[in-house]
Each structure stands twice: as structure tokens, then as C-alpha cells.
Image: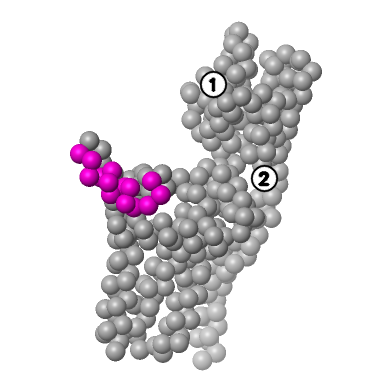
Amino acid sequence: MASVLFIVFGALFFTLIIGAALSQLFRREIVIYGRLVDYFGSDDGVDRLEKDPGRKAFNWGILERTNRGLKMWIDHRTKPAKKKALEERLREAGYPMGLTPTDFRLLQLLVGATVFLCFVLLLLKMGIPVISIVLLSSVMAILAMYYMSFYVSALIKRRRLAIQKMMPDFFDMVNLSIEAGMGLDASIMKICRQMKGPLSDEFLQTMRDMELGKSRREAFADLRSRVPVHQFQSIITSLIQADILGVGMAKALRSLTHRIREQRTQMAREQAMKAPVKMVFPMLFFIFPAMFIVMLGPLVIYLLQMVF
């Protein structure tokens, strides 16, 4: 019985792995096929299109339909509020691997199912009761699914730190370009092309919004809401106020860059003040025991030899 279960779960495991790999490799073709199906209303229209020698469409059959069906099921089962919150988190993380909220949920399910099957296959050969195997595998699958959320949180934190580190140099270069005679929009566009990073990506999105018809004030307000970094939000608020009041951008940016560097100095001092407190627990649990063993170990051994 155990051998049969091993074969069945092994086949399911490798099927899921191969399906996930092919889904990622042919993701573009699958999206094109889905749009064609939506346009023609059924698979028959796509089949007629494929018979046309002048035009071709991708048809991956069962895999594509399964993938699309799972995404539709996840999309219907996810509440709009949770979907919106996940969309905001993925946006703050920089859309890792270009994932949408539905894709992220599907990836979570695939990771959880893969971990579950792996642990089931590993524990079946150890003679553990089936109930214990299922419970342990379920716990590990849930932890693996939540690890995806933790990973997104880590990406968000890393991206915010990257934005904070990039801010002084970015606004210094924008200030120099404005003082050289360029406008604010042209300066931002030029610096975004020269400096690659999350801050440049956010400003490029703002420039695209302005090209689509938004005013500078509205585009900067959207930028402020997209990047939840307190220092950055205060700078964008100052730029919006300077635009409203007609203050020269070069003067405003000069004072803002000076304030950014002062804030970075204060943050460095704050981190230096926190360092001794953070070092207490590593010293208490790792350094002091080793020192006591090295210093008092020979004395304890000598006393034990004297006693016994």
C-alpha cells in the first residue's frame, strides 16, 4: 500500500512541477491565447484562427485551460478588499516576477501543494502513522504558503531602504539639472534614465501619468501615495506646495536635499545608539557562555579531579 501511495504522490508531484515550469516558460503565449478566447468567445473561434495559414495562435490544451480555470476560481474566491490589499503590497514590492494578485495566490497554492507532497513522500518511508504524516505535511505546507507573504514583506522593506538611500543623490542630480537650465520634468526624466532603481521607476511611472493627461500636482500626489516612506512623502508634499505657490524648484530642491542629508545623519546616529541594546542578547546567549567555558572550564575539571 505504501509503495502504491508513493508512486501516486510521486506522479502528482512531478506533474505539478512540470506544469508550473511550462506555465512560466510559455506564459506569454498563454496570455495571448486567453485574449483570443475572450475575443472570439469560445475555443472554436481560436481553432478557426489556427487553421488560417497566415496567422497562428498558441494552444496548450489542458494545461492552459487548467491554469485559466484555477485563476478564475481564485479570482472569484478572493474578496475585493484582500485583492486590493495584496495589489498594494505587490506594488510596493515592485511587482516581483510580474505577479498579479491572482498569480501570487496561485503560486502560493502550488508551493504549498509541492511542499505537502514532498513531506508526504519523505515521511512514508519512515514508518510514521498516516495521520501524523498528513498533519506534519499540512503544517509545513501552511508555513511554506505564509513564507511567500514574508518574502513579499522583506522585498517591501528592502525596496523602501533602497529608495531612502537613493533619494539624496537623485534629488542632487535633479537640482543640478534645473540649475543648468532644464525644466523639472525634463530633469527628472533625464536622471531616471541615468540612475536605475526603485525611485527612478516610481518617477518614470509619474511621468507616464502626466503624459496621459494628469497634472503635475495630481501625478505627484499619486506618487506620494504609492511610496509609503515618510521622508519621501514630505519631500513630494514640499514639491507640490512649491508648484502651487510658484516657488523656484531649484531653491526648493536645494533646501530639500540639505534636509534629506540631515535626516540621514540623524538616522545613522539613531542606529548607532540602538546598537548596544541589540548586542545584549547575542552577547548573553552566544559570547558570554563561550567565554565562561574557556575561562572556567579548566578550573571545573581541576576541582572535579581533586574531589573524585
Q: Quadrant of residue 16?
A: bottom left
| Residue at (30, 66) in percent of width and height | 15
Local crowd at mark 2 within 10 Å, few (<14), some, or many (≥20)?
few
Residue 48 percent across, percent down from the top left: 27, 46
The disc labelled 1 sits on which kind of residue?
Met
Which residue in the rendered view is the most extreme toward the left?
A: 53
Numbered circles on residues, count: 2
Q: Main secondary structure of the magenta part?
A: helix
Element carrying mark 2: helix
The reply to whether residue 87 is visible in this rendering is yes
Q: Which mark is residue 271?
A: 2
Element carrying mark 1: helix
Which residue in the rendered view is the most extreme toward the bottom?
A: 308
Q: Is residue 2 left or right of residue 147?
A: left
Q: Is residue 188 above or below residue 64?
A: above
Q: In this figure, which colouring scheme has been used for the structure?
A: one colour
Identify the magenta region: 40-53
Which residue in the rendered view is the most extreme toward the top?
A: 181
User: Which residue corresponds to mark 1?
Assistant: 189
Q: Is residue 48 magenta?
A: yes
